Amino acid sequence: MSTRLNYIAPWWIYWLHNFPHLNLSFQSVDSSFRPQDEDYQQSLIVLTCMAAIGLGLNLLLLAAYLTCVCCCQKDEDDEESKRPGSRCVSWVSMLAGLVICCAVGVGFYGNSEANDGVYQLTHSLYQANHTLDGIDRLVTGTVGGLEGGLKQHLGRLDEIFAVREDYVRTLHAMQRTADSVVVQLRGLPDLGRAKLNLSTIAEHTLYWEHRRWLAYLLVLVFYLVISLAVFLGLAKQSRWLLTILTVFGLLTLVVSWASLGADTAVAVGTSDFCVSPDKFIVNQTEDIVPAAITHYYLYCSPSLLNPFQKLLTIFQRSLTTMQTQTQSLLLSTALHFPTAQRDLFGIQQILNTSESSLHQLTALLDCRSLHKDYLEAVVGLCYDGVEGLLYLCLFSLMSAAAFCVLLCAIPRLLKHIASRERDYDDIDEEDPFNPRARRTVARGRRSSQSHVHSFCSYSSRESQSSLHLPPPLPTTTNAPIAEYMNQSMLFGGNPRYENVPLIGSGRSSPPPSYSPSLRSTYLSMTDSQIRHFGTDLPV
């Protein structure tokens, strides 16, 4: 005895089903699933157009905000109020980027859930199609065996048993029984049409689902790249990168609203089907399969009788009768009609094959197999499929809101970056606290220190070695004394007059004093190193 597995629609199916269904004239229409009805199609189009209206309002408000930002300039001289505003805008942009990352995660989950639901639907359709194909093959094979092989054997036996009227009557009774079974089997519904419909639905569904999954995957990867570019632009404070993000932000805003409208329409339409899928299936298959048979497989209730039980019982009794008659002929004609044994064994083999097909047909025509496929298909579509579409709608809403905030924040960021660069360019180049001036002075100081090191090397070498070199020629520095002293005071503290070359006719600077550590370093130098430093001495 079969037990029914109940299908209970989840709460989100009823929530989506209660969405207002309006045609293009804004008149309420029936929310039952009728995809061929023009008014119902218009109601789904209206849901998609609502997203287009939301996109228009979003762009209008965004344009008004950007106009206010461009026209209502803040006071650039108020430095204290400008810095906190820049930090606030940067934090808002960073939070918008994080929201985009979270939306991408939600989108990946929703895309996977929707794909799993559709895969379960198509897998169940293929399984049901395989069951129907098995029923069709068994019926065709049985009818062919009874009409073809059995008829040929009976025709030859009729000639052999022509002298025995009782045997001929038995053969004619077997022929009438076989014809009755063939008529009963031909009275089955045309399962070939139902099989073709299921196969077509599964193929088309897989075709479009693969492209939908791939398109969403590319969109999600693109959104993820945009969110990473937001963080990079904030870190680098790059104006050109933020400008490019503005253009792509507008594009992603349009894509988000478009996907929201499409997902909402598909989710509502699927929910209308999932509220009462059995009703729609009965209406669609009434031209192919009688309603009683459809109800038997959709509900599989113990109170419902198997509509094929009468046919299967007649088939079983007919096969039993023909097997008994064949066995009787085999026993009674073995001695007098030995040539008939071959045809009688052939008939017995056909009947055994038909009996085996009967057992398989009985199992396939039972409601449990097809009802299980029906439940798996409906659960996959109405649970995982619609749930995935809801997550994709949430992804579209989150990404649209995040990109809208980002498009509002980027112009203010660009203004702060431009103001900072303008203030940086306005710094006096002669100001010693200017970073550029510090780098210039540092390079001048390193140059002066290298020049002083040559004097130190010359003086130390003269005091430690036995080389007799002529006194150095008078040298002068290229920089004025005042600039050199200012640099020393700026970076070294107190001025070191002993490091300042004397400016005069025919006079050189006295040898500078150096620390004991410098003396030990010089004493440890090799002759090659001394000769190398000697090249720095003036001739």
Image: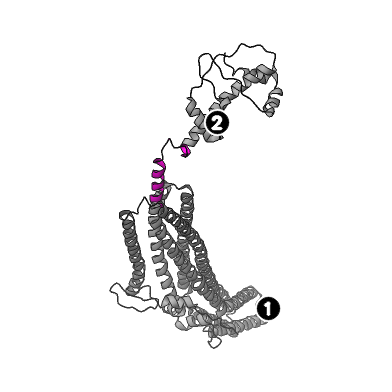
Judged by its main secondary structure, the magenta piece is helix
Dot 2 corresponds to which residue?
A: 495
Camera-side residue of 296 and 274: 274
* 31 relative to 229 in the view: left or right: left
Which quadrant of the figure has residue 330? bottom right
- Secondary structure of the residue carrying numbered label 1: loop
In magenta stretch: residue 51: no
Tell me what residue is drawn at x 54 percent, y 27 percent.
447
Please give the range of residues in magenta: 413-436
Foreground mark, 1 or 2? 2
Q: Residues within 10 Å of mark 2 (few under 14, many from 20)?
A: some
Residue 254 image point, x, y percent? 37, 59
Which quadrant of the figure has residue 258? bottom left
Is any atom of residue 63 visible in this view?
yes
- Secondary structure of the residue carrying numbered label 2: loop
Residue 51 image point, x, y percent? 36, 66
Tell me what residue is drawn at x 41 percent, y 65 percent.
260
Marks 1/2 in contact by CB < 8 Å: the verdict is: no
The colour scheme used to paint the residues is one colour
Dot 1 corresponds to which residue?
A: 334
Camera-side residue of 417 and 209: 417
Camera-side residue of 311 and 191: 191
Label located before the other in sequence (1 or 2) = 1
Q: Is residue 80 above or below residue 363?
A: above
Q: Is residue 421 above or below residue 365?
A: above
Q: Amino acid at mark 1?
A: Ala
